Amino acid sequence: MGLDFVGRGVGETDGNIITTSIEKVVNWGRKNSLWPMPFGTACCAIEMMATLASKYDLSRFGSEAIRFSPRQSDLLIVSGRISIKMMPVLKRIYDQMPDPKWVISMGACASCGGVFDTYTLIQGVDQFLPVDVYIPGCPPRPEDLIDAVMQVQQKITSGASPKGVEAVV
Amino acid sequence: MNEEKEVEEQSKPLVLEKLEEHHADALLAQDEMRGTVVVVVRKEQAYAVLEYLKTDAELAYTFLVDVTAVDNSQMESELMQFDYARFMVVYQLYSYQGQCRLRVKVPVHESDLSIPSVTALWKGANWLERETYDMFGINFEGHPDLRRILMPDDFEGHPLRKDYPLRGRGERERFNFDKQNV
């Protein structure tokens, strides 16, 4: 499932050996075990919880292992408003995550400030974080978050680097 | 007719009667808003009145629900009522005993932004007064720890004042990223 076999030794080895590239195997593993770090600061976090619960069940996509330590996660889900006081905290959490790491900006507030065009609210976390996938909506439905996780999975399968790595290179 | 008169007599709240009796010189105005009694009190006697409201056995407003302020600088009709005091500090009280609410308002002039802290009466006033200081710049004298509570420590200005621009003065772009303001 999802593993692109480069060659198959049918006949010669009775189908017990497959050949592929190491990147593809590693990416296959990464894609199916994305461990999210939830950064829920507002109502989007409620939808994120619904996505993880039994009805929508994000574990079907291998992402049910929510880690509340950034050091054990590789997918940051920013779901909610980020104020100027919160942004240094969020940046510090992102910095603590091991590479490779991906970022989902969930909902209107995280992506552009939403309706809160005020003195204290960050107008889009992508000013300070490399965001891989944006989700529109206020708040987005769980299906939207699932779609975003699947888009991250597609990026990983295609061998694309996370935005954060691209920025460094 | 008789019945109506009875209702009228009952509708005079106990708290107003008692305040008129004990603190008549402190009362600037009294009103009723959707069933809640509102009194406006002179700043000099504000602490004494609040202490009386809390400690009086019959009134017993033991619960301080909220402390906040209102910037009336663009409300001419409000300003002229109380000698052009720009701010109005508002205390929301609740009495479990009488099961009734009371709103105490205190006019504060911009020339003297200090008002006695009520943290000695209600410990819960600590963070409420810090928020009012943070948002309006009211100085609560005698407060044990009057720091900002919502905005970063190095923030300048008081954002709920009416002359503060909604989109700020560029803080969104120029905030201090490295400082551990947490």
Image (cartoon, coloured by chain):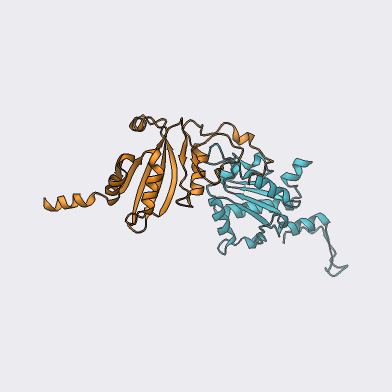
Position of residue A8 relative to residue B32, above or below, is: below
Q: Residue at x 38, y 52 (%)?
A: B54
Q: Residue at x 59, y 43 (%)?
A: A83
Of the pair A86 and B145, the residue shown nearer to us: B145
Residue A161, can we see it?
A: yes
Total marks drawn?
0
Q: Quadrant of residue B152?
A: top right
Counting from the top left corner in percent of width and height, residue B15 is at 30, 50
Left or right of B105? Residue A18 is right
Of the pair B129 and B32, the residue shown nearer to us: B129
Q: Quadrant of residue A130?
A: top right
Q: Residue at x 64, y 49 (%)?
A: A104
Of the pair A127 and B34, the residue shown nearer to us: B34
Residue with the most extreme bottom position: A14
Chain given the colour cyan? A
Q: Residue at x 42, y 31 (%)?
A: B73
Chain given the colour orange? B
Position of residue A33 relative to residue B102, above or below, is: below
Of the pair B23 and B2, the residue shown nearer to us: B23
Left or right of B56? Residue A42 is right
Residue with the most extreme left position: B1
Counting from the top left corner in percent of width and height, residue A70 is at 70, 54
Left or right of B114? Residue A61 is right
Counting from the top left corner in percent of width and height, residue B178 is at 69, 41
Residue A132, can we see it?
A: no
Counting from the top left corner in percent of width and height, residue A30 is at 74, 57
